[in-house]
Image (tube, coloured by chain):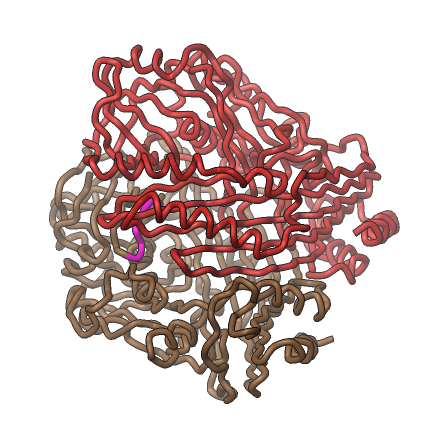
Amino acid sequence: MKASEKARKILETLVQISSQAEVNWLVRRRNALLVGSGSPVAGSGTVTSYSVRIQRNGRAGTAGSEGGGHPALIAENAISSARTGPDFTWDLPSESPSTAHFETRGKLPDQGMVLNFARELSSCADAAFPGTLLNARVSWGIDGVGIINSQGCVGEYSRNRVRVDATVSSATEDGLCRRSSHFECTCLPDPPTALRWLFPALSRTGVPAETVVGRKPVLFAPPALGVLLQAVRTGVSGRVLLDGASWLAGRTGDCVLSPLLTIREMPLHENGASSAPFDSEGISTSNKALFRNGVFKGFVFDLASGSEAGLPSTGNAGKNLGGHPMPVCTNITVDTGNGGTLEEMAGRIGNGVLVSGILSAEGSDAAGGGMLLDCGTAWSISGGEITGKLVNCLISGSAYDILRNVCDVGSVQQRTGTDLLPCVTAEGVRIR
Amino acid sequence: MQENRERAERAVQASEADFVEVRLERILTLELAQIGRRGGSVGPVQREGCTARALVSGRWGYAWSSGFNCIEALIDRAAGSAVAAGKGSVSFTTVSPERNSFIPGSSEPFTGTPLKDKAFLCRHYCELLGMTNPGASARVDYSEVLRDRVVVNSTGTSIREVEELCGLRMQAALPGNVTASRSIAHRGGLENLRHREDLVREMTEDLCMRTNSSGPTPGYVPAVLGPELTGMLVHEAFGHLAESDVLVQCPALGDIVSPGRRVGAECLCITDDPTHFTLPGSCSWDDEGTRGTRTSLVRGGVVKSRLHTLSTASETGAAPAGNARAWGTGSTPMARMRCTLLEPGEGDRDSLLTSMENGVYLKGCLGGATDMERFSLIAESGWTVRRGKIDRPMGPVVITGNVFDVLKNIDRVGEDIQLFGNMGGCGRAGENAIPVSYGGPHILLTAIRIG
């Protein structure tokens, strides 16, 4: 039975016990190839899952199923969830979203192409840092996504998805050097580009530098900037606003970041792994600037948080299997500047620090912006040159303060996770 | 599940591949959150799936699907993938086949408890946190996982194990980013989560202490670590290094953690033990069907053994001890930790503080990470220590360093061992997080970097 047919059957069951109901489905078809020093391992599989939400006695109930799951059992689970669920005081959409112009760009690879890609990636890593061993897991396939609700809304689309997880390791005279990274998009990039996305400063020396402390200019490579932007992802959520936890509350229209920064939420990006023509409640999505030249443009909402705030949904509902929708961002992009390459930006810094990866950001207050970042991979910049590796480099302070002090933005976007980000330099970052 | 297990047994025996393994999983999950006065839930969610692995001419192939409808087709697809990959040189150790089941009971199974009772439990702790800490925002999360899994392979192994796991996470925050939290998880039913008002009391004390704390002065200092932090340090600083499939990715590590190599002082004894059956990560058999047994990783500061799958055990000639773990449809078994602990030595906390004289005392753990070269842990609470006595509170403290250096700095190990588990689990690049537990006694480090 097709996923859409089963979703319809589930909905038929749900409408018998609830006044409003919706069913989401996701079919993940994937191929995978693990490559490293041993023999490659190939695999493939399909996982189909259904999420439901019902309105019952004025409350919302949810349930989820992957694989089996009879419609009656899913309905029973949703009913039990509704007994303790949040208020459900709005209407589900009755209009179906348009998917006519939605298309993700790029051709999916075959197994041979992926094997060649992994071998070339490994050669590029070895050329950048001789003796490096690269292990990669590449998975690729198509997501089939759909929604149907009791009010007549129906939508369905598919998108390509390619994910590369890689680890490089090498033994140097100063010990072991090991880094992991990943990105997701809709097609395989060429191996040199992929290596740059994964490990932006792989060729840097492993020789330890003198410890750096105090307030310094810091050049954040895209993977490190991605961690800083977690504060933005969380802070722009309408749910976090309603919970009273967002630092951005009351700051719509204010210039809160550096005027050099324009940060966008891009659900219709043609190469975005999280691209979608409609959100998980069936509301059409749109590309939007979250911050334009540093000015905060507004929060993102789903139906529930929008209703509570007296505003419409912005088409940003996302949910985990069996969960309630929450306002979320999809593909985040930061507009490029005139800063040139990472090396050119380092040259302008004079003396400072390059951070290309964050080992740990736990304990951070993401919604409020407070952070204590353990920089896993950081280098000292002296006289405009990247001179040596920094050990035990910690950055503390507010992510919003760091983003307000950005003084240089690179000219090249790189993919990190599902985001597209350039390098940025921030002044006066506290290093301890 | 029993019917599907028998189907899998027949399908495995009918296959012509050199080796075939089928894993069936049914996972039921529920998450509840009480945030102030607002409640919410994720689920209930039921996941069912089958993952098949086949070895043909020295190469693995694998295939997976949600549901149990196509076990036979998945074996064929996995074998097809292996054949398409050509000839290889994969070998694996075989263990004595077992046919057995382990379906433990609990005094208050969560499957029989109405969802509203679990929501009431969250609300109860959340209200208590709010009442005892005026002005604080409170949040309590409840999670439960019921995992029913079958592993069948062509050597004749057929095992079934049911894991019932539930836990709570309590958080409270005062204005000014003053926070406190507690996480607990157990293998068993709700009986382990009731009457835990002691956690609320501890959090209230923590909040009070942190309101008056100043941050740490960054630098290298002597430190006494509490049992939870000790357990997490051992997990991050040595446990991940001992996972043998990482050595395939990085042969240089093989020399650093090879059996016989000294990695620390005489007092350092690290064990990975799956037989603490009340804790997350415990198991009767792993996800390759190997019986879980206690593994001594370090004894007297010297590496004794590492954690293995059947493949890595074959490559190194070691005996597998049930460390091949996978979680969820489509994941393949990797060498992973279960309950990793530092064995107790002599002396209590106060004797270690006296021995240290001046330094810091750190306890509780908010999380940790390692890239194998370095580690980073966040101690939930810290105090300066003067003349062997606890002095000034510092609030949360980050400890960080080189994984190879920190073990050498463990100078004394106390006797007061405690074990911990939470619902977060342990993740590795690109793979699902799996339940683990960890622990140890108080320890004294000659130097560690705090920030």
At 26% from the left edge and 47% from the top edge, which residue is drawn? Answer: B177
In this picture, residue A150 sits left or right of residue B104:
left
Q: Is residue A188 above or below residue A18?
A: above
| Residue at figure coordinates x 21%, y 52% from the top left | A398
Where is residue A314? Give x, y as percent: 37, 78
Q: Is residue B229 above or below residue A379?
A: above
Q: Residue A269: x, y in percent?
A: 40, 75
Is A53 magenta? The answer is no
- The residue furthest front is B131
Please, what is the dominant secondary structure of the magenta stretch?
A: loop
Q: Quadrant of the C terminus of chain B?
A: top left
A153 vs B368, left or right, is right
Residues shaded magenta: A361-367
Which hue is chain B drawn in? red
Q: Residue at x 58, y 63 (%)?
A: A81
Q: Position of residue B176 (x, y in %)?
A: 22, 48
In the rendered image, the vertical position of residue B309 relative to residue B168, given as above or below: above
Q: How many marks?
A: 0
- Tint of chain A: brown
